[in-house]
Image (tube, rainbow, N blue to C red):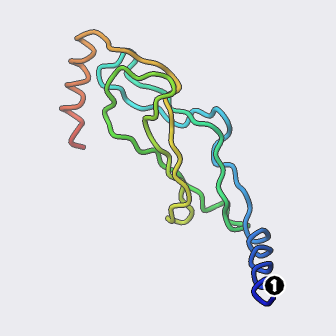
Amino acid sequence: MRWLKEGRKLITWGAQAFERVAAYAEGTIVADANVYGGEGGSCRTGRQGSSAYLPRGSRKCLSAEVCYNAPLLPPVNAGDQIAESRVFCDDNLVQVALLYAADSGSDSSITRIAADALKQLALGWL
């Protein structure tokens, strides 16, 4: 019966020591992703609501980054998974969430593709 008491203490501590913090609200546009040769040049990335459990009182430690393999190639359809967001607390990874395209985009003209090629050539090494 001692293990039952210890288990109950552990669950009680976990419920009291952590709080649920909303990282992104439902339908939030998180970032813009470049689409190589795409119609608009970029695609808005959004996601469904996201929250993380953090130690109480540690909301100031939150930071996030969006990671995707650039450049994205058209066509990009709304709802396609194109990136992920990484939420950190004091440089410790807390949560990874998938990001989806909020807009659809298709191929563009040859001039747009050429302009994106020049942009990639000039700035791709930075």
Q: Is residue 108 above or below residue 73?
A: above
Instruction: Give the image quarter of residue 116.
Output: top left
The residue tagged with tag 1: helix, strand or loop? helix
Looking at the picture, does residue 86 appear above or below residue 123? below
Q: Which residue is mark 1?
A: 5
Give 76 or 40, whichever is nearer the viewer: 76
Quadrant the N terminus occupies = bottom right
Q: Residues within 10 Å of mark 1 (few under 14, many from 20)?
A: few
- The residue lying at 20 percent from left, 33 percent from top is 122
Position of 33 with respect to 12 (left or right) is: left
How far across and how far down the image is residue 97, in percent? 53, 47
> At x 45% / y 21%, what residue is drawn?
77
Residue drawn 31% across and 33% down? 71
Looking at the picture, does residue 102 appear above or below residue 1?
Answer: above
- What is the x, y in percent for residue 40? 40, 17
15 left or right of 90?
A: right
Q: Residue furthest front?
A: 1
Point out residue 119 in the picture as x, y percentages from the top left corner. Answer: 24, 28
Q: Up-down: is 18 above or below 69?
A: below
Q: Nearer the viewer, residue 91 or 80?
A: 80
Place residue 24 in its image quadrant: top right
Counting the numbered discs, the total is 1
Q: Amino acid at mark 1?
A: Lys
Which quadrant would the C terminus be assigned to in this image? Answer: top left
Res. 10 image quadrant: bottom right
